[in-house]
């Protein structure tokens, strides 16, 4: 029974890896259900808003800060290439050896970047015109950090369970990855619509230290 259960978990992980992780910046969708859940979990973000209309200069400044936070969290093209190579190794990233060590370093770095980005987004003043996008990216950084934290847990124990639900972590990874991919498209559209509305240039990758 245990062998069968472990085999099923390995199949789940293999499916996830074959689909490849989306290591580019993904954002969270803006459905009302998600918004209600978010508002309950992250009420402290609202403390940063004054509830007043903002002029275009304020909106542009918000986008400048927001884009810089994204750049600090985002993999560079070279880093993304290495990440794709690592994640294409399949189940070897969970087995003792060089691939596992490389994957562990990658995931640890991603967890750190996303945790910092979430903190920065929580400190960024909420502007009414961009509040929806602000909350969406904050949610993404939290979810991404949790996802890669769970990958690290699986490297130590493929049978690890979620302490909140008691369910095997591996069994939910495929669905979580698929949801993030779908949410990515929704939020890219939201981001682009707001940029067009306020005349903000499209987001472009730059080294995080660039101004």
Image (tube, helix red, strand yellow):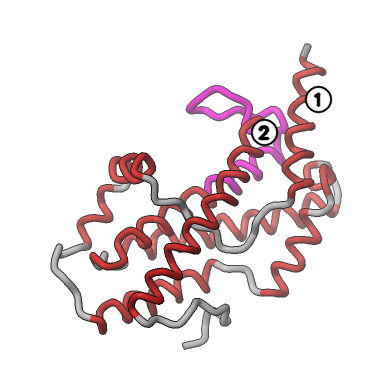
Instruction: Residue at 31%, 47% (x, y): give it.
Output: 42
- What's the magenta region? 145-170
Quarter occupied by residue 190: bottom left
Residue with the most extreme bottom position: 211
Q: Report the front residue among 71 and 191.
A: 191
Q: CA–CA distance between discs 2 and 1?
A: 11 Å
Q: Give me the disc on residue 7.
A: 1
Residue 93 in percent (x, y) is at: 79, 47
* In the rendered image, the vertical position of residue 71 relative to residue 201, given as above or below: above
Residue 91 in percent (x, y) is at: 82, 42
Q: Report the front residue among 17 and 190.
A: 190
Instruction: Residue at 72%, 41% (x, y): give it.
Output: 155
Quadrant containing the N terminus in the rendered view? top right
Residue, disc 2: 170
Instruction: Residue at 40%, 72% (x, y): give it.
Output: 66
Q: Is residue 77 left or right of residue 14?
A: left
Instruction: Residue at 45%, 76% (x, y): give it.
Output: 68
Q: Secondary structure at mark 2?
A: helix
């Amino acid at each position: 029974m245990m062998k069968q259960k472990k085999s099923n978990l390995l199949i789940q992980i293999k499916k996830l890896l074959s689909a490849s992780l989306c290591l580019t910046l993904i954002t969270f969708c803006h459905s009302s259900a998600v918004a209600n859940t978010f508002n309950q979990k992250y009420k402290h973000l609202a403390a940063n808003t004054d509830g007043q209309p903002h002029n275009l200069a304020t909106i542009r400044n918000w986008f400048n800060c927001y884009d810089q936070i994204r750049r600090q969290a985002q993999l560079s093209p070279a880093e993304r290439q290495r990440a794709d190579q690592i994640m294409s190794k399949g189940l070897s990233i969970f087995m003792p050896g060089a691939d596992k060590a490389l994957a562990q370093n990658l995931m640890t770095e991603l967890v750190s970047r996303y945790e910092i980005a979430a903190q920065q987004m929580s400190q960024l003043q909420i502007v009414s015109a961009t509040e929806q996008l602000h909350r969406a990216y904050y949610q993404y950084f939290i979810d991404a950090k949790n996802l890669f934290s769970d990958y690290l847990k699986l490297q130590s124990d493929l049978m690890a369970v979620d302490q909140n639900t008691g369910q095997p972590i591996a069994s939910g990874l495929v669905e979580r990855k698929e949801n993030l991919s779908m949410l990515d498209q929704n939020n890219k559209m939201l981001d682009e619509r707001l940029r067009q509305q306020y005349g903000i240039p499209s987001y472009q990758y730059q080294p995080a230290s660039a101004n």
